[in-house]
Amino acid sequence: MTCLETQSKIIAYIDSNLEKDRRIEFLKHIQCCEDCKEELNIYYTMIEGMRQLDSNMPLTKDFSEALDRRINLELKQSRQKKGVIQSSFVMVLIAVFTFAMIAYVNFLNLLHQEEQQKLKLAQGEYYYSETFSEYLFEPDEQELILNVKQDENEMNFYEKIRYYNVVH
């Protein structure tokens, strides 16, 4: 905001008729420009003094101190609101990030469970086929009967299992 714009808004500021965004710009300019601050101080002293005289109120002893308190209070409130908005935004961002991470972990768990379920279904009886195929899978019934030894004590464990599965 330029000095000309700031000085044109002095009366509106004193009457509290400046919109929020303009008021913040105005106050920031007033803080860094001594000429505009002096102009504001003159108008504020004159207008507030007239209001107090018209209302039959006792005159303020130091108008510039009252003006400085008003400016500092408004700037502090603006910073607090800005801080609340920023912290709220950060909290929402953290909540969204946390929700996304939880959803991602749950998705990975579901994917893992689905893959494990597919592996279990695929395993079935053929899971160990590469290692134990000659021992676990049933041969033809005729082949087993031909190869059955007369004495069951001579059969190894896997032959006994095959024989049992075929007979029963």
Image (tube, rainbow, N blue to C red):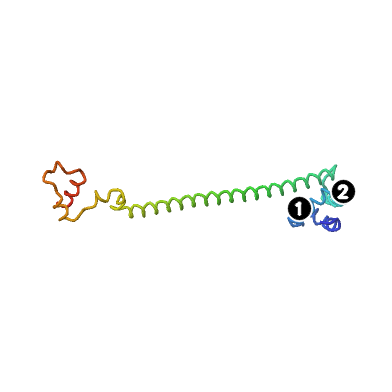
Q: Which residue is mark 1?
A: 24
Task: Describe the element under mark 2 as helix, strand or loop.
Answer: helix
**Which residue is pictured at 78% across the width and 54% down the height?**
25
70 and 126: which is toward the camera: 126
Q: Is residue 11 above or below residue 68?
A: below
Q: Residues within 10 Å of mark 2 (few under 14, many from 20)?
A: few
* First in sequence: mark 1 vs mark 2: 1
**Which residue is pictured at 13% across the width and 46% down the height?**
149
Task: Describe the element under mark 1 as helix, strand or loop.
Answer: helix
Q: Which residue is mark 2?
A: 34
* Residue 53 appears anywhere in the view: no
Q: Residues within 10 Å of mark 1 (few under 14, many from 20)?
A: some
Query: Image quadrant of residue 64?
Result: top right
41 and 61: which is toward the camera: 41
* Residue 108 appears anywhere in the view: yes
Q: Are marks 1 and 2 in contact (CB under 8 Å)?
A: no
The count of marks equals 2
Distance from label 1 to label 2 (Cα)? 17 Å
Q: Which mark is residue 158?
A: none
6 and 151: which is toward the camera: 151
Q: What kind of residue is marked 1?
A: Ile
**Which residue is pictured at 15% across the width and 50% down the height?**
147
| Left or right of residue 139, residue 102 in this image | right
- The spot of residue 96 in percent (x, y) is 55, 52
Q: What kind of residue is marked 2?
A: Glu
- The spot of residue 56 in percent (x, y) is 83, 48
- The spot of residue 32 in percent (x, y) is 83, 48
**Which residue is pictured at 19% across the width and 43% down the height?**
156
| Left or right of residue 43, residue 24 in this image | left
Q: Quadrant of the N terminus?
A: bottom right
| Left or right of residue 59, residue 116 in this image | left
